[in-house]
Image (spheres, rainbow, N blue to C red):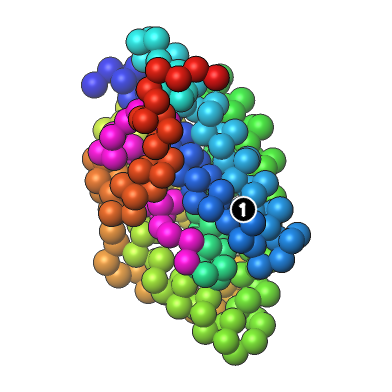
C-alpha cells in the first residue's frame, strides 16, 4: 500500500462517518421533540454534510479518476464505505440519538483536535474549521445527556439503556490498521490510542454529571476498516442513493 492509497482511505473514513451520521440526523427533520430542537438537529445534519463534502472531494481529487464527491457519496456499494459503526445506528427515540451522537461527538472532537496538527495541509485545515462545529455538537449532546440522566426516573432509565445498548460499538471508533501506521509515521494521521484517553476523560466526566453508569468494556463490534457493517447501513443507502441510481445521467 502506498501513502497515496492510505491517504485516500483515511479521507474516506472521515468523510463517510460524517456523511452517514448526517443522513441519520436528517431523518429528524420535522420530527424533533420541540421546534427549537428540531432546528438544532437539522443544523447538526448540515454541518456533518459540509464536513463530508470536504473530505470526499479531497479523496476524489487524490484518486484522480475524474470522480466527484457525489460519485463517492452516492455510487458506492455498502462494502465500499468506511464509516464508524456507531454513525449508522438507527435514531431510535430521542435519548438513543443523544447517546449515540454524544459518544461520536466526543470521538470527533478529540480526533479533529489532534488532526489540526496534521502535516497534510488539507486535513489540518479541515480539522481546524470543523472543530468549531464539533465543539458545539459535543456541548449540545453533553448537556442533553446530563438533563436526561439527572432528570426524571423515566428519562434516567431510558438514556442509561441507550448507553448500555450502544457501548459495544464504541470499540470500533479506535480500531487501527496499516493505513493508520503508515500515515502516523508520515505525520498525517494520529494515534487513536491517544485519542481514546481524552475520549474516556470526556465521557466519564459527563456520565458522572448525569448520574449515569459507564457500561463495562466487554464484547466490541468492529469491522468498518474492512468495509463490514450492520444491516442498517444497506437500508440507509437505499434511501440516500435512490435518486442518483434511478437517474444516473441526471444533471443539476
Secondary element under disc 1, as helix, strand or loop, is loop
Q: Residue furthest right?
A: 36
Judge from the rendering whether residue 155 lies leftward or rightward of residue 178; answer left or right: right
Residue 101 drawn at (x, y percent): 54, 57
Closer to the camera in the image, 99 or 213: 99
- Regarding residue 174, the answer to whether it shows in the image is no
Q: Give above or below for 203 relative to 46.
A: below
Judge from the rendering whether residue 244 lies leftward or rightward of residue 153; answer left or right: left
Main secondary structure found in the magenta portion: loop
Q: Residue at x 38, y 22 (%)?
A: 248
Judge from the rendering whether residue 199 lies leftward or rightward of residue 62; answer left or right: right
- Regarding residue 34, the answer to whether it shows in the image is yes
Q: Residue at x 64, y 32 (%)?
A: 128
Q: Residue at x 25, y 46 (%)?
A: 228
Q: Residue at x 35, y 34 (%)?
A: 180
Q: Which residues are magenta?
A: 73-92
Q: Give above or below for 230 relative to 45.
A: below
Residue 29 drawn at (x, y percent): 61, 53
Query: Can residue 220 be found in the magenta stretch?
Result: no
Residue with the mark numbered 1: 29
Q: In the picture, residue 249 is in which quadrant?
A: top left
Closer to the camera in the image, 235 or 198: 235
Q: Quadrant of the C terminus?
A: top right
Residue 237 drawn at (x, y percent): 37, 42
Closer to the camera in the image, 221 or 249: 249
Q: Residue furthest bottom?
A: 153
Amino acid at each position: 500500500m502506498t501513502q497515496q492509497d492510505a491517504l485516500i482511505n483515511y479521507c474516506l473514513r472521515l468523510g463517510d462517518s460524517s456523511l452517514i451520521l448526517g443522513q441519520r440526523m436528517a431523518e429528524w427533520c420535522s420530527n424533533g421533540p420541540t421546534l427549537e430542537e428540531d432546528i438544532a438537529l437539522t443544523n447538526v445534519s448540515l454541518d456533518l454534510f459540509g464536513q463530508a463534502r470536504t473530505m470526499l472531494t479531497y479523496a476524489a481529487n487524490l484518486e484522480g479518476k475524474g470522480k466527484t464527491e457525489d460519485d463517492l457519496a452516492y455510487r458506492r456499494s455498502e462494502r465500499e464505505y468506511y464509516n464508524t459503526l456507531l454513525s449508522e445506528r438507527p435514531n431510535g427515540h430521542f435519548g438513543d440519538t443523544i447517546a449515540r451522537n454524544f459518544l461520536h461527538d466526543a470521538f470527533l472532537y478529540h480526533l479533529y483536535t489532534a488532526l489540526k496538527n496534521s502535516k497534510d495541509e488539507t486535513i489540518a485545515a479541515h480539522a481546524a474549521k470543523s472543530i468549531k462545529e464539533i465543539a458545539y455538537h459535543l456541548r449540545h449532546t453533553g448537556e442533553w445527556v446530563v438533563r436526561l440522566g439527572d432528570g426524571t426516573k423515566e428519562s434516567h432509565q431510558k438514556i442509561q439503556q441507550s448507553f448500555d445498548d450502544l457501548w459495544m460499538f464504541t470499540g470500533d471508533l479506535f480500531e487501527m490498521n496499516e493505513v493508520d501506521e503508515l500515515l502516523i509515521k508520515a505525520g498525517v494521521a494520529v494515534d487513536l490510542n491517544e485519542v481514546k484517553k481524552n475520549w474516556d476523560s470526556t465521557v466519564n466526566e459527563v456520565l458522572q454529571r448525569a448520574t449515569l453508569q459507564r457500561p463495562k468494556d466487554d464484547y466490541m463490534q468492529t469491522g468498518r476498516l474492512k468495509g463490514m457493517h450492520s444491516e442498517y447501513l444497506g437500508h440507509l443507502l437505499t434511501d440516500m442513493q435512490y435518486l442518483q441510481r434511478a437517474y444516473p445521467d441526471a444533471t443539476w
